[in-house]
Image: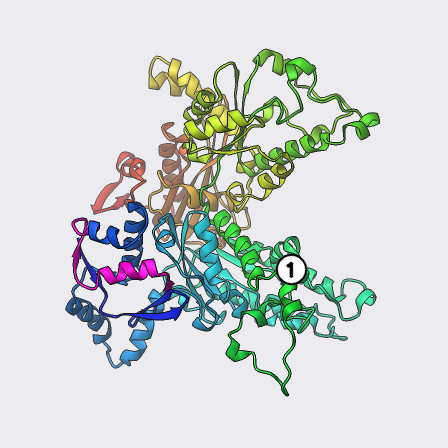
Amino acid sequence: MILRRSRFLHQVPVGDGRVMLLHAASQLRLVVGADVAAVVDYFAGARSLPEDYPGLAARVTGTPEAILGCVQALTEHGLLTQKTPDEELAELSAVLASTHGRDPEALLDQHRRALKQGGESYWAAGAAQGIADLGQGGRRIEAILMGDCDLQMEADFLRQEAALRGIDLRIAATFPDDLRLAAEHRHDVILVGALRARHRVTDPLDPVTQAPPYGPYIAEAQNLLDGLRQHSAAPILIDNLPEPTVQPLGLAERGLNGHRNRFRLANAALAELADSYSDVHVVDIAAALGAAGAERLLDDGQVGFTHFGSPGWLLQRPETEKAAVHGLFPDIAPLAAQVGGDPYLREKALARAHVDALVAALGVDRKKCVIVDLDGVLWPGVLAETGAPFAWAPDVSGDFSYIGLFFGLHEALLALKRRGILLACVSKNDEETVRALWTWPDHYPRERLLTPDDFVTWRVNWEGKVENIASIAEELGFALETFLFIDDHPIERDRVRQRLPQVEVWGEDPFALRRRLLEDPRLQPPKVTGEAAARTGLVRAQLDRDRLRKGAVSEADYLASLDIRVAPHRLQPGEPVDRIEELFQRTTQFNTTGRRFPAAELAALAAREDAAVFSMAVADRFGDHGLVGAVVMEAGEITGFALSCRVLGLGVEHRFLQHVIEALRARFPVLQGRIVPTDRNRPVRNLYRDNGFAEVEPGVWRIGG
């Protein structure tokens, strides 16, 4: 591979050993350290990789993976290129040549917007990126930020926070009224900051209409969300409003119309609005700032009741903007002390909250199963020796005050189960003894405590925990990266970390465990459905089916013994669509087109005369699979067919499709289906062929007529 520095690249020293890499065509600005600048300089002339790698390695410090990762990142940014200078110029000329009467400058602006990265330059606050930063790789996520200065100043800190989690976050920032960027710029997620109408929340109450003062704010949010949904189906994360740290009338702020309560009501209304859209999630900025210390992070104690900027703003500005007024300039030492010497404390705190929300919304590194040790984790001591999980009783609670730690952990794990996270346990113990002793007397808070039935599978034996964890992963069919293991014993934790490095291990700090479980975004599905809450029972039933299949004489005998029952249903207007939306979002193997259908679109299709939405529930002798199939038909074409992987191999897809054909035959005697091949959907490729459809053109199948 031949690489060279782009002909459009300019390198500008900006002090402290930093260099700004500026691409003249795309206007990409990247502040890097001297090590990255040295990498760029090495490609001033054409270089061949891997042949010329030794020369590059001699110039800079870093692992081969980091150095080559840095080269790849610079290439993705267009700062290094495989094209010759003439080829680069010809490519840009081709973009601008077909003007058809349009101004080439407008086309160049459109080209730049499509490639845009970072915030507005005035608010850029990033530390220089080194080889290790650019070369770390990780999952690449493209995000659009829509907000004023407070959010745009956060752009560089978002990138840094994401990098700590192995995410290569690429950001294009703009203002809230620039909706068309969502149509022009590739993105995986959109982040929306506090909107300008927040200043209206403190307006006087209209004496005639008594309309809520937050009405204009919610109206602006609704207009923005409606506009974005015209251009994008990506998840949208929208900030709520910080809670004020000071109030105009102090103690006299009474009732729901009080200053602080106005913002609380606005946030409640925003949450309700977001819930009416598909894949729109509120980022609880109020809670994030409160947890980090809002008085240090909000400037409403200094400059205005609704500005909600950073107290460190003055510390962040260049010296040229700190002009004296009438020869006077305040001593800013107290301000520096207030923010702990870090003027970007607020930006860093909010970056953590925003990346948390991004990870949860996109399912980055999602954990599917939490495996816990028993003795010392779910109860103190060794159960086989103590004879009971706890020695607690209401009359002696003062003597056993730390028992609340265990109760809190049980409650947190039950909350994860309701989210759809599976629970499993491993313990060096006698299983029969543990099951006999694991009981709760009447005076215990049973609704907060785990029972053996809450676990999808057990490994209570005298085998090693490493082997037992690997066995659980094989039984469930999950990758090791999707497991979290909790143990109180440092040797066991270390052994699992060494032997199964893909498994995340917790347990060092029992006082932090509950909060970590409840707040870690990798344990937070963006939406909890009835299917998710029932997942433990569904998976346990599937394990029973797998055991039956292994003992069956033939596959036909196995399927016959299951007593499979299907219940197809055509959705009527107003019926819930959340699970169907989830199926199309999460199903990749048995999905004919890969198309996602937001809830609002599904509801609209169910109400149309020329469209239909079908669902299918499946059950067998082991239990209920739940709602596992969905079909969308529009104007005589099946535009979506999705089937959960949990029922693959049962043949229910054929019964479902035949039902759909019969249900639509009177109105649509000719029905068409389409297969859009993806890397994952091989299992669905022959669906239409196996059900009597004829291929009329590549990927298009038709029946009837």
Find the residue positioned furthest to the bottom. 326
In this view, the residue in front, 212 or 40, is 40
In this view, the residue in front, 321 or 458, is 321
In this view, the residue in front, 344 or 351, is 344
| Drawn side of residue 441 relative to residue 57, left or right | right
Which residue lies under the disc numbered 1?
A: 267
Q: How many marks?
A: 1
Q: Secondary structure at mark 1?
A: helix
| Drawn side of residue 293 relative to residue 350, left or right | right
- Looking at the picture, which amino acid does disc 1 mark? Asn
Residue 481: percent from left, percent from top: 43, 35
Q: Tell whether position 604 is magenta.
A: no
Residue 29 makes an appearance in the image: no
Coloured how?
A: rainbow
In this view, the residue in front, 155 or 590, is 155
Give above or below for 83 relative to 439: below
Query: Residue at (27%, 62%) from the top-left corner?
Result: 78
Give above or below for 470 relative to 353: above
| Drawn side of residue 250 relative to residue 386, left or right | right
Query: Residue at (76%, 66%) from the top-left corner?
Result: 257
| Drawn side of residue 158 relative to residue 664, left or right | right
Residue 283 makes an appearance in the image: yes
| The magenta segment | 30-53
Residue 114: percent from left, percent from top: 34, 66
Residue 625: percent from left, percent from top: 48, 30
The crowding category of the residue bearing disc 1, from other C-alpha atoms within 10 Å (few below 14, some 14 to 19, many at least 20), is many
- Quadrant in which residue 102 is drawn: bottom left
- Quadrant in which residue 8 is drawn: bottom left
Query: Residue at (74%, 70%) from the top-left corner?
Result: 210
Q: Tell whether position 43 is magenta.
A: yes
Residue 578: percent from left, percent from top: 52, 46
